[in-house]
């Protein structure tokens, strides 16, 4: 349980760190911009090094996932986290061949145990589920923003279109 908590906490910290790493470098302390002066405490906390119990997302993606029988059942294809940086789920690609025909399922970080790699091999994640159970699980649906509606306007729209100004609408019976 402690291992799961440490992994979840470390991964959350890594995601927040990655967001800060993408920010532009701070201005000199003698001449901060007005926006920085008006923000809350105005203090920026830098993380200067990765600790042994922390993982980077780039290292974590692609990690093998083992089933309850210690056989590989997939790998981590993505990481789902909220806007505060908290990891919500690990997206696991299951089945298929070279990514073709694979399905994705998302599982909470608490579902996994970290299994240390042997003889210098990378760590693996283990589930208490089988490959068959994951293949029967509901597919993970990635969010797709709604498309702008284009029906009813423009010359190519069905049932719509534009008419010259001053002309009466046509009526058909």
Image (tube, rainbow, N blue to C red):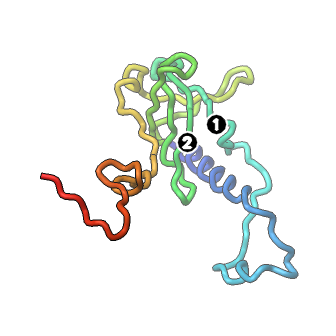
Q: Earlier in the sequence, mark 1 or mark 2?
A: 1
Q: Nearer the viewer, residue 100 or 26?
A: 100
Q: Nearer the viewer, residue 50 or 15?
A: 15
Figure label count: 2
Residue 123, position as x, y percentages in the image: 64, 29
- Image check: 25 left or right of 135? right
Label 1 with label 2: CB-CB less than 8 Å: yes
Q: Nearer the viewer, residue 65 or 97?
A: 97
Q: Residue furthest front?
A: 167
Residue 135, position as x, y percentages in the image: 39, 24
Reply above or below: 17 against 33: above
Q: Residue at (56%, 38%) from the top-left corner?
A: 78
Q: Quadrant of residue 35?
A: bottom right
Q: Residue furthest left?
A: 173
- Image check: 158 left or right of 57? left
Q: Residue at (62%, 48%) from the top-left corner?
A: 10
Reply above or below: 171 against 53: below
Callout 2 secondary element: strand
Reply above or below: 27 against 63: below
Whole-angstrom CA distance, mark 1 to mark 2, is 9 Å
Q: Residue at (59%, 51%) from the top-left corner?
A: 12
Q: Which residue is mark 1?
A: 60
Residue 120, position as x, y percentages in the image: 74, 24
Q: Residues within 10 Å of mark 2 (few under 14, many from 20)?
A: some
Q: Quadrant of residue 34?
A: bottom right
- Image check: 158 left or right of 50? left
Q: Residues within 10 Å of mark 1 (few under 14, many from 20)?
A: many
Q: Which residue is mark 2?
A: 79
Callout 1 secondary element: helix
Reply above or below: 98 against 105: above
- Image check: 110 left or right of 161? right
């Amino acid at each position: 349980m402690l291992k799961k908590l440490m992994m979840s906490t470390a991964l959350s910290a890594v995601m927040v760190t990655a967001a800060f790493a993408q920010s532009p470098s701070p201005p000199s302390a003698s001449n901060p911009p007005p926006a920085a002066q008006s923000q809350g405490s105005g203090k920026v906390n830098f993380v200067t090094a990765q600790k042994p119990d922390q993982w980077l997302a780039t290292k974590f993606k692609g990690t093998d996932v083992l089933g309850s029988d210690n056989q590989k059942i997939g790998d981590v294809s993505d990481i789902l986290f909220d806007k505060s940086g908290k990891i919500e789920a690990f997206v696991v690609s299951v089945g298929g061949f070279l990514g073709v025909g694979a399905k994705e399922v998302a599982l909470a970080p608490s579902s996994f145990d970290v299994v240390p790699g042997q003889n210098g091999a990378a760590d693996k994640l283990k589930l208490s589920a089988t490959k068959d159970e994951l293949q029967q699980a509901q597919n993970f649906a990635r969010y797709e923003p709604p498309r702008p509606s284009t029906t009813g306007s423009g010359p190519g729209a069905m049932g719509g279109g534009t008419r010259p100004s001053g002309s009466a609408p046509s009526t058909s019976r």
